[in-house]
Amino acid sequence: MPARASSADRLYLDHAAATPLRPEVAEAMAQAAADAFANPSSPHAAGRVARHALEASRERILALLGGRTADGRRDRLVFTSGATEANRLGILGTGRARGDGGWIGVSGRDHTSIQAAATELAHRGWRLETVPLAAAGTIAVDAIRAATAACPAARPRILAVTTVCGQSGIREDLAVITECATADGLIVHADATQAVAWDEVDFATTPLATLALAPHKFGGPRGIGGLVVRGGLPLLPLAPGPQELGLRGGTEAVSLAVGFAHALSLAVAERRDTAARIAGLRTRLERALLTAAQAAGVEALVVGSDSSRAPHVALVAFAGVDRQAFAMAADLEGICLATGTACASGSSEPPTIVAAMGIPPRFRQGVVRLSLGRSSTSRDVDEAVARLAALISRSSRTSGADLSSP
Ligand code: PLP
């Protein structure tokens, strides 16, 4: 039964799923909710205040992401409910604007929302291809060429790319992919949801068509996300209406947009320092876990340890351990960690990237994801390792089915 359950004792190692709302962001949102409460579509003075707050947030976000805000072919930012909807709008909205019968490429790195949107296009007659991954966990570039060669160049072809994989933290080589995709005339949708807090995202210098993100991954609010849309790109709304340049109907959530912009500007300003600190903590965490596993006689590895990774995710695989039982036992010890992305939690399948990278089968059921964030400390890491070491040791003595405290 629970060894430790008090919230004061809790160690949160699931920042890739959600980060705590930053107090300064909450403050800015509360102010906006009071000052800019009106409907931004109302033409009266109060509505104009809300409109101004909304559009100022939009411009601020676009500028921080390298979107083109000058007149002419302006890039657009469509506010959505989160990254799931942004991925759907980027893929389905672009696909539907091009008609039926194109090609859509996804990979085992992608979030389920990308897979789901691509499957919907497949129901509309598009050819859906899962592009293989190289051993490093990035899209195998040759595979893009081979896959698209089968689809006539006259048909629309969309490639979905996840810039930082939410399961593993492994970065995609965006420059190589987009260069190859551009040469082949592909429309590239990027999911940068896990990247924004750690890596520079510059829409101006990449030939991306659309880019999805959500601020709850970097101290911003839940319930809002965004899709950056290249100026001039044809896109059909999924929920038609006059708002959001006709690309998403419904009254806009002004205070959430203000929080989004505020969180992004803080994250961008602090990115370099925070990333360096968190990379150090992640190294410390991974080394200590591998050492604990070795001491317990449990074979272990870090997925993607030789790949370029964003600093926040440690995807660790313990041979012969049942990851669901491990995560439950960790929870009883007061440690919040994950067995994959939050939307896939409870799935009996390990994270898709593990098989796609060819990780040996004996490790696959024992994969757990620990993810750090801006508020993580060395004490969190050391205390988590101390508690997990005991669990790993117990797992070497059980079948993995029951790891609760003896
Ligand atoms: N894309 C990636 C890479 C993610 O990590 C997530 C969330 O975990 C999403 C999309 C979905 O984001 P949201 O929960 O905002 O819909």
Image (cartoon, helix red, strand yellow):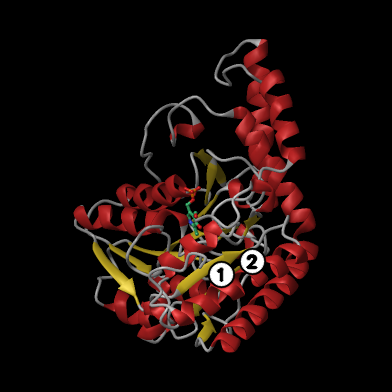
Mark 1 neighbour density, 10 Å: few (under 14) some (14–19) many (20 or more): many
Assess mark 1: CB under 8 A from ligand 1?
no
Establish if 339 lies above or below 227. Answer: below
- Identify the residue shown where x is 57% and y is 18%: 39
Establish if 17 lies above or below 285. Answer: above
Q: Which mark is first along the chain, 1 or 2?
A: 1
Asked if disc 2 and disc 1 are in contact, CB closer than 8 Å, the reply is yes
Establish if 322 lies above or below 22. Answer: below
| Residue 10 x %, y % | 64, 53
Question: Residue under circle 1?
Answer: 169
Q: CA distance from mark 2 to mark 1?
A: 7 Å
| Residue 53 x %, y % | 68, 28
Q: Quadrant of residue 28?
A: top right
Establish if 24 lies above or below 177. Answer: above
The label number, if any, that marks residue 290 in the structure image: none
Question: Residue under circle 2?
Answer: 312
Name the residue nearer the viewer: 4 or 282.
Answer: 4
Residue type, numbered disc 1: Gly
Secondary structure beneath label 2: loop
Q: Quadrant of residue 346?
A: bottom left
- 319 relative to 30 in the view: left or right: left
Residue type, numbered disc 2: His
